[in-house]
Amino acid sequence: MKITTQQLHAVLGNTEILRGIDFEANKGEFVGIIGPNGSGKSTLLRCLYRVLTPSEGAVFLDGKELSSYRVKESAQKLAVVAQHNYYNFEFSVRDVVMMGRAPHKRALDRDTAEDYQIMRQSLKAVGMQEFEERSFSTLSGGEQQRIILARALAQQTSCLILDEPTNHLDIKYQLWLMDIVKNLDCTVISAVHDLNIAAMYCDRLYAMKQGKVIAQGTPHELLTPDLIRELYEVDAEVSIDGKGQLRIFYCPYSRKEA
């Protein structure tokens, strides 16, 4: 699936958060969005998955305007792993993952053997198959994030949207989750906090600041000391390791002052 936006604007309260975003993710690409807190990354993603309605501009799925799809139709095409997932009721892990099957069902349809098979396959994919009977609320933040990824996998969409998906995970599971996502046969769009993670997994990057895209390109093109300083107001050293992997090392302020 190809996703594009044209001159996307978004206003929250009296503040313009997005100021004319042109964005493109081609079929099968892993596109990362980087930028400091408050730059508009999450707001852009929320417009893509219909939690927010743009004040101007449009989002397109394979050339068709997103607003022309019924919500259920777009949910069959886009799955989301958001930063925060709260439930007012006690749901089991099984129930949470089965929510991913809802876009494929009509009202009052019962869960089928195929639904349960897909749910268990999704739990296995994230290494949580033994947690099926557990209450979602009793899990750690990292475990919950893996269950939310399983729910998105159960949705079986052609695009996956992730909002800083590794925030609550330790290093092992950060890499493990991103490996899973990287190997999916779909388009992936993710806000990424860790630039080394972005360099390892993203095909292309969009750099955002103050609601605008200020640069785009491959990680090797974009992740330079100058761009990092412009985005985050920190100094960094960028090098290539023996395997050709980009590595970013930040310079502490104490060292700068010395």
Image (spheres, rainbow, N blue to C red):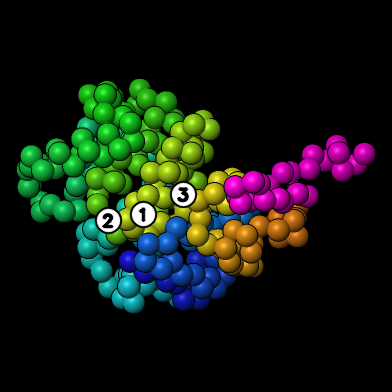
Nearest the eye: 68 or 245: 245
Q: Position of residue 250 (x, y in %)?
A: 74, 43
Query: Which element type, helix, strand or loop, lies under badge 1?
Result: strand
Residue sitting at x 49%, y 37%: 174
Q: Which mark is residue 157?
A: 2
Picture layout, residue 248 above or below residue 230: above
Q: Is residue 250 magenta?
A: yes
The answer to whether residue 215 is left or right of residue 136 is right
The answer to whether residue 4 is left or right of residue 159 is right
- Tell me whether the residue at label 2 lies in contact with that at label 1, contact meaning CB atoms closer than 8 angstroms: yes
Task: State the residue position of label 3.
Answer: 163
Residue sitting at x 59%, y 67%: 216
Compute the Cα span from label 2 to label 3.
17 Å
Task: State the residue position of label 1.
Answer: 160
Kind of residue at disc 1:
Leu
Task: Say which label, 2 or 3, has the lower sequence index.
Answer: 2
**Residue 255 sits in which quadrant?**
top right
The answer to whether residue 225 is left or right of residue 156 is right
Picture layout, residue 189 above or below residue 4: above
Quadrant of the snapshot with the N terminus: bottom left
- Given this view, does label 1 or label 3 mark the residue nearer the observer? 1
**Residue 193 in view of the camera:** no
Residue sitting at x 43%, y 66%: 25
Pick out the residue farthest to the front: 242
The answer to whether residue 40 is left or right of residue 184 is right
